[in-house]
């Protein structure tokens, strides 16, 4: 079930609140298993399904603007999952 934009924003903030944003990587995908496990080779610290790609892109951009790693414009038209993982320490 998809979560609201506000809920996802609050959950990400609660996970990252005591850590500099540049220690985190954020992104969107339509296939979390492929993107995270096969491509990034990471287990996510957070993953959630949004209602639309527009919501996913807005949230991704918000946290990129705060200094998280990643890049805008990725994904496909059905990329409604947003994910977060901690970069190497």
Image: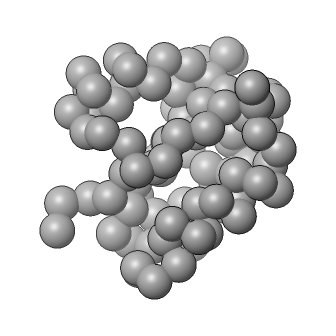
Residue located 66% across and 31% down the image? 49
Where in the figure is residue 56, as x and y percent of width and height? 69, 39
Foreground pick, 39 / 11: 11
Residue 73 place in picture, x, y as percent: 58, 36
Quarter occupied by the N terminus: top right
Quadrant hosting residue 6: bottom right
Say whether residue 65 is left or right of residue 19: right
Quadrant the C terminus occupies: bottom left
Say whether residue 79 is left or right of residue 18: right
Identify whether 15 is placed above or below 38: below
**Rendered image quadrant of residue 51:** top right
Colour scheme used in the picture?
one colour
Residue 53 in view, yes or no:
no
Residue found 35% across the figure and 17% down from its top = 34
Q: Residue furthest front?
A: 1
Horizontal placement of 62 versus 82: left or right? right
Q: Position of residue 71 (x, y in %)?
A: 47, 47
């Amino acid at each position: 079930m998809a979560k609201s934009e506000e809920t996802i924003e609050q959950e990400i903030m609660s996970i990252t609140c005591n850590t500099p944003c540049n220690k985190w990587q954020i992104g969107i995908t339509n296939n979390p298993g492929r993107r995270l496990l096969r491509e990034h080779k990471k287990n996510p610290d957070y993953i959630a399904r949004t209602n639309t790609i527009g919501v996913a892109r807005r949230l991704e951009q918000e946290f990129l603007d705060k200094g998280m790693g990643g890049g805008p414009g990725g994904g496909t038209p059905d990329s409604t999952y947003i994910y977060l993982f901690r970069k190497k320490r």
